[in-house]
Amino acid sequence: MLCCALALLAGCQTVGPINEQAFQPSNNPVTVDSVAKNDKMAVLAKAQHPRILATYGGEYPDPKLERMVAKVVGTLTFDADNPSPQSYRITILNSPNVNAFALPGGYLYVTRGLLALANDSAELAAVIAHEMGHVTASHGIQRQQKEAEEVLASKVVSDVLGESSLTKVALIKGKLRLAQFSRNQELEADSIGIRATAKAGYDPFAASRFLQSMASYSNFRSVTGAQDASLDFLASHPNAPQRIDLAQRQARGFGTPDSGTVDRDSYLAGIDGLLFGDSPEEGYIRGNTFQHPGLGVAFAVPAGFMIDNTAAEVTATGPGDTAVRFDGVSVDTNITLADYLRSGWVTGLDAGSVQATTINGNEAATARASADGWKFAITVVRSGDRVYRLLTAAPIASTTLESIAQSVSASFKSLTAAEKEALRPLRIRVVTVKPGQTVGSLSAQMIGVDRKLELFGVLNALPPGGGVSAGDKVKIISDR
């Protein structure tokens, strides 16, 4: 609802035509040789590769990390009885979202966000084997066929029954059939993946452990609203206690929890230094402040607001259905900002409210607008060769819009060279627990994140009330 309200003011920034030459399949992280040249499915997958890179922030280059992931994939795919195994090409995606997927023809993708969440090589192997299972079972093709069948069936039902209640029931049943079909595919891929993980010598219980980490991550994210949920593993991989239980039961057929390789130390060494959260190209969220060293600007939102950063825009949501949107546009320097506000991009603009002003030494202009039960406060600020827009929206009955908008606008500033230099990205750092250290003292060391104690538990897969012992290796978040 808030996104719709903000969209009334200005259309969302869209990604332009994709430069196919700018995104080529990764040459470094290759486990075997290359994708089979005459495989028609590989040709289709290759066509999707640049689009996947564009969606997920491109490739994350890290030779140490690539070697670690390649080792896991190589272990999964090694078969002494098969001299010509399926070739795979691995790409680590530069995205904080937690996801992994495989395309026909041997294209494997895993995000740095997923690598940050996993805790050992067996868990990574379980995720990758699950995705390989989808390809092995031709689930993508099956789903396309099933969706086509349901679309055709829905059209027939609509043509015959019109807009009756029977039509709605039939269409709902069609959606439920697709949902059940997807659920069955996930369970089948779980089964294939657990079998492959165990066959490779890894802990067969790794799948259920990572599913539990995913559940914890989901609960954590539901409060923070961090990242783009549509790009997460959780969006396409339903998670439930029953599924975890099924994974555990399947794993018992291959051994006990301690019967397979976990390879935790090697995995943690591989992800030590891994970028966590926002990339420098997208700017940083630090508490209630957004800072972008590349653009050289920063602003803050009031306490109680949660900031979400994407490649296209920055949004923040707060109490009383209030939302803030921030983006940047190019505006001819000969056009005053007051005239820019009146140029037609603001729906429901109150032309009499437009005022020229300055904010922290920057040329600026403000205005008010209303449309479809919402009211808006708009501030535009010129900094360098860009104009930045701060759009605050609230329901028409809100009594706090003015004060919130004033607080956000007044916080906007251009960063000094020293401030830009001081900004550093957050990274995963693996540390060894020293005698006397506790979950509380270790989580307190984390920098640049909120709810440190809870996040520490999620990252390290600690059960509720779980602790650490001297000599354990754990993950913390730091900018060093």
Image (cartoon, grey):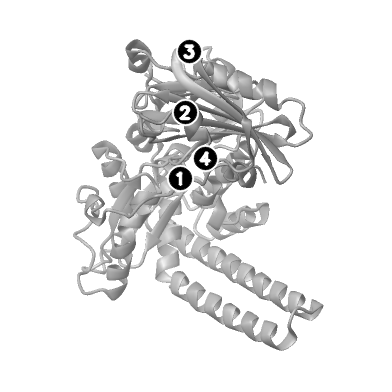
Amino acid type at circle 3 is Asn
- Left/right placement of residue 384 relative to residue 157 reads left
Which image quadrant is residue 197 in?
bottom left
Whichever of labels 4 and 3 marks the residue nearer the N terminus, that label is: 4
What amino acid is found at the position of numbered circle 2 in the picture?
Leu
Measure the C-alpha gap from mark 1 to mark 2.
20 Å
Q: Could you tell me how far apart the alpha carbons at marks 2 and 4 are, in whole angstroms? A: 32 Å
Q: Would you call the spot at circle 2 few (<14 residues within 10 Å), some (14-19), or many (20 or more)?
A: many
Q: Secondary structure at mark 3?
A: loop
Closer to the camera: disc 4 or disc 1? 1
Disc 4 versus disc 3: distance between alpha carbons? 30 Å
> Three-letter amino acid code at disc 4?
Gln
Residue 447, image x, y percentages? 48, 19
* Residue at image mark 1: 13
The residue to which callout 3 is attached is 360
Question: Which numbered marker is on residue 384?
Answer: none
Residue under pointer 2: 337
Q: Residue at x 57, y 67 (%)?
A: 182
Residue at the spot 26% in from the left edge and 37% down from the top edge: 64
Tell how many labels.
4
Residue 453 at x, y percent in the picture: 59, 23
Q: Secondary structure at mark 1?
A: loop
Q: CA distance from mark 4 to mark 1?
A: 17 Å
Considering depth in this image, is 362 or 196 the residue closer to the camera? Answer: 362
Callout 1, which amino acid? Gln
Label 3 neighbourhood size at 10 Å, few (<14), some (14-19), many (20+)? few
Single out the mark in the foreground, 1 or 3: 3
Q: Secondary structure at mark 2?
A: helix
Evaluate if marks 2 and 3 touch, with contact meaning CB atoms under 8 Å apart.
no
The residue carrying mark 4 is: 227
